[in-house]
Amino acid sequence: MFRKLHVQLTALCAAITALVLAVLSAVCLLISESGIRRQEYDAFLSGAAAMYQSLEQQNLFSHALIRQLEHSYRLSLQLSDNGSPFFFQQLEAASVPDGIWEAVSRRALDDCGLNLKEPASLGALTQHHEFSIVYAGKNWYASAALLPRSGGFVGVMAVRALSAMEQRIFRQRLAFLLTGLAALALLSAFFWNFTARMLRPLSENRKKQIQFVASASHELRSPLTVILSSAAAVRNGIMAGDRQFLDTIDSEGRRMSCLIDDMLQLASADNRTWSIQPSETELDTLLLQTWEQYEPLAASRGLHWDIALPEEALPRCRCDAGRIRQLLSVLIDNAFSYTPPNGTVRLSLEYAEQPAARKALSLRHDARKAPAFFIRVTDNGPGIPDEQKEAVFERFIRLDRSRTDKSHFGLGLCIAQEIARLHGGRILLTDTPGGGATFTVELPAAVL
């Protein structure tokens, strides 16, 4: 599904880009070609005017003069004396297609009323007209003129082929096309990678949802099987020794209820509907109460249960005390579960304003001196390998599946991480010096 969506998004982006590039290229080409044609026509007009000015100053028209004018103004000339072509032009090979002079003469007569063979009247000044014609499948600029002379007139026709200009325009169009295709290819590659990066989180979330459903189904199946089998045994009649089946049903039902509660909390976090109710909280008092609450459990497991609080008075933290207790319960239960008898678990609190404290926790250096609370749960258990440190915060992840404690489903640390994020903080996992794991909860301080 995501593969098809990836291709469709890339194709859509590429199509929109191609349309935009085509429109912009067409507009730019239209403006550029219009300028080229105007520049070429202006150059033809100025060349023709300069050429007529040179001819007006000549008394004799030699072959060398005609060739010089053609070369200087990039024109092909045809001169006639009282309607008869000059003799030297009749002898040389034509540099333009046969018949073009007749076409220019006819066009000058039909459109401009200029008769180069038998003019109706001659004025004292040169009469000339410029126009464009199509001859032999090519475009030409043409000019026709009558130069009055003593005893008659001189007819002048000048043409310039537009093939050089058209080749220039063609090369420009080709350059625009190749540039546009190259740009489209590069942008298509960019869109392919960009849409892949956009869809990657969706694909990963979908995979996680599938894994979540599969893991949740597996976790629910075990207690459900036990409940159904116990219920079947009880259905035959409760006797004195059958009370254990009811106890099993009760414990497994509570276990399922706990799992469902955890899954609902994570679903609320995923939907961004999990809210907190912050209030002014003294974190040192909250930690002390939590430590006292876990003293009996630590004693029953033979653990050294310590607490370290700052001696100076701390500012209050604006947080949801109930959620922080839930977070601490997850970290403490986790530490108690993996710490062997006679091991040590410590709960500590620190308030820091210096960026050095953040750097000591292997955090990205932050130049801002933002104060924060750091709550640590430290144990000297087996620790967590570096390659598994990130995995412990994923759902249904338990590093030691051989444990018989079924009250943990691998969701606790994930829930604790979500609680920290709701408070604008985070949880960091580092190694305890000498062995073990240290979970550090960083909470931004709101000094009241």
Image (tube, rainbow, N blue to C red):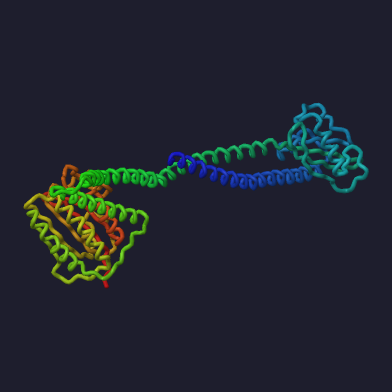
Residue that extends furthest to the right in the rendered view of this protein: 120
Q: Looking at the picture, how far across and down is residue 403, in whole percent? A: 16, 45
Q: Which residue is found at the position 33% from the left and 56% from the top?
A: 269
Q: Which residue is found at the position 81% from the left and 26% from the top?
A: 91
Q: Is residue 361 above or below residue 80?
A: below
Q: Which residue is found at the position 20% from the left and 65% from the top?
A: 351
Q: Is residue 165 left or right of residue 333?
A: right
Residue that extends furthest to the bottom in the rendered view of this protein: 448
Specify the quadrant of the image occupied by residue 100. Answer: top right
76 or 331, nearer to the observer: 331
Q: In this view, does 183 lie to the left or right of 205?
A: right
Q: Looking at the picture, how far across and down is residue 442, in whole percent? A: 24, 60
Specify the quadrant of the image occupied by residue 18. Answer: top right
Residue 413 in view here:
no
Q: Looking at the picture, how far across and down is residue 447, in whole percent? A: 26, 71
* Number of dots carrying numbers: 0
